[in-house]
Image (cartoon, rainbow, N blue to C red):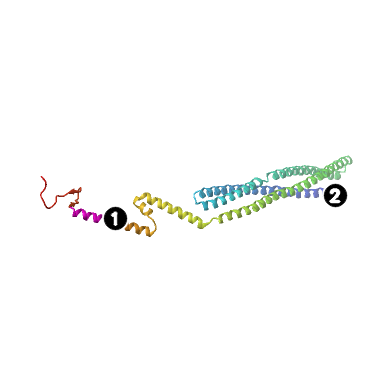
Amino acid sequence: NYRVSEANTQLSTVKIMETTVGNAEKYFGQFCSVLASYTRKTAKLRDKADELVKNLIDFANTENPELRTALKNMADELAKIQDYRHAQVRLGNCERSQQALNISIFSLQTEIKKFNSVRNREIKELEKLEKLRHRAPSDRHVIAEANVQKASVDAARTTHQLEEVIDNFQLQKVKDIQKIFSDFLTVEMIFHARSLEVFTNAFQNLQECDLEKDMEVRMEHTVSLQGNSRSFADPGLRDVVEQPKNTDSLLQIIHALIYSRLQIGSLLRCFLKEGWHVGEGDRRSVAPKQGKPDL
C-alpha cells in the first residue's frame, strides 16, 4: 500500500510537470509569433517612412531655397529614424531563444515519457505482487517481491533524473523569458530615446523655415516672370517698361516733343510762304503766280 501511494504521488508530480511544460510550449510559441508579427509590421512602417522621405525630397526640389532647405533637413532626420527602425527590426528576433526552449521542452517530454513507462511497470509489478500474496505460493511471492523491488529502484532513479531535467528546464525557461523580453525592451528603449532626439531636430529644422523670406523670394520670382512675359509678348510695352521712373525726366521728354512739333509747324509755314505745296504724293515745285513762264 505504501508503494502504491508513493507511485500515485509520483503520478501527481508528473502531471504537474506535464502541465508546466504544456503551458511553456503554448505561450512561448504565442510570444514568438506575436513578436514576429510585431517585427514584420515595424518593417512595413520603416518602408512607408522611407517612401515618405523620398516624396519629401522630391517635393523639396520643386520649392524655393528656403522651404527646400527646411524640408530636406527634416527628411534627413526622418531617414535617420528609419535606420534606427531597421536595427529594431533586425534585433527583434526571438527565433534562437525559441529554438533553445523547444530543445529543452523536447528533452523534458522525453524524460516524462520514460518516467511514465518505468512508473507503469512498477505499478504492474505491485499489482502482480498483491495477487500472488492472495494465492500464497512462497516461491512466486519471492520472485514477485524481487521484481517489485527492481521496479521501485528504476522508478526512483528515473524520478531523480526527471527532477533534474525539470530543474534545468525551469532555469532555462526563466533565462529565455528574461532574454526575449530584455532584448525587446532594450531595443525599444534605445529606439525611442534616439528617435525623440531626432524627431526634435526634425521639428526644429521645419520651424526654421523663414516664411517672410520664402514669400519675398516667391514674389520676386513672380514679378520677374510677369515682366519677361509682357516684354516678349508686346514689343510696344518694352519702351514703357524701360521709361525712367523719375517724373522730371518724363516732363523733359514731353517738353522736347512739344518743342519739336512747334519747330516742324514753323518750317511748314515758311515753305508755304515760299511757294511750296505739300500734297498727298511726293513734294513738287509750283510755278510763281506773277510773270510768264520761261520758254
Where does the image place residue 230, in percent across and percent down from the top left?
Answer: 38, 52
- Label 1's element? helix
Q: Quadrant of residue 241?
A: bottom left
In reply to whether residue 220 is colored magenta, the answer given is: no
**Residue sitting at x 43%, y 52%:** 224
Q: How many marks?
A: 2
Where does the image place residue 109, in percent across and percent down from the top left?
Answer: 74, 44
Which corner quadrant holds the C terminus? top left
In reply to whether residue 273 is colored magenta, the answer given is: yes
**Which one is nearer the viewer's eye here, 268 or 280?**
268
**In the shown orientation, is residue 169 left or right of residue 253?**
right
Looking at the rendered structure, the kind of residue marked 2 is Tyr
Residue placed under numbered mark 1 in the picture: 260
Where are the magenta residues, as a range? 261-274
**Which one is nearer the viewer's eye here, 283 or 176?**
283
* Inter-mark Cα distance, 2 to 1: 144 Å
Residue 2 marker: 2
Residue 71 marker: none
- Label 2's element? helix
Say whether residue 197 is visible. Answer: yes
Category of crowding for the residue at label 2, using alpha-carbon neighbours closer than 10 angstroms: few (below 14), some (14–19), many (at least 20): few
- Can you tell which of label 2 and label 1 is closer to the viewer? 1
- Mark 2–mark 1 CB contact (< 8 Å): no
Where does the image place residue 183, in percent across and percent down from the top left?
Answer: 69, 49
**Residue sitting at x 64%, y 46%:** 87
Looking at the rendered structure, the kind of residue marked 1 is Ser
**In the shown orientation, is residue 218 left or right of residue 244?**
right
**In the shown orientation, is residue 229 left or right of residue 36?**
left
Residue 110 vertical placement versus 267 (above, below) = above
**Which one is nearer the viewer's eye here, 6 or 275?**
275
**In the shown orientation, is residue 133 left or right of residue 34?**
right
Residue 152 vertical placement versus 250 (above, below) = above
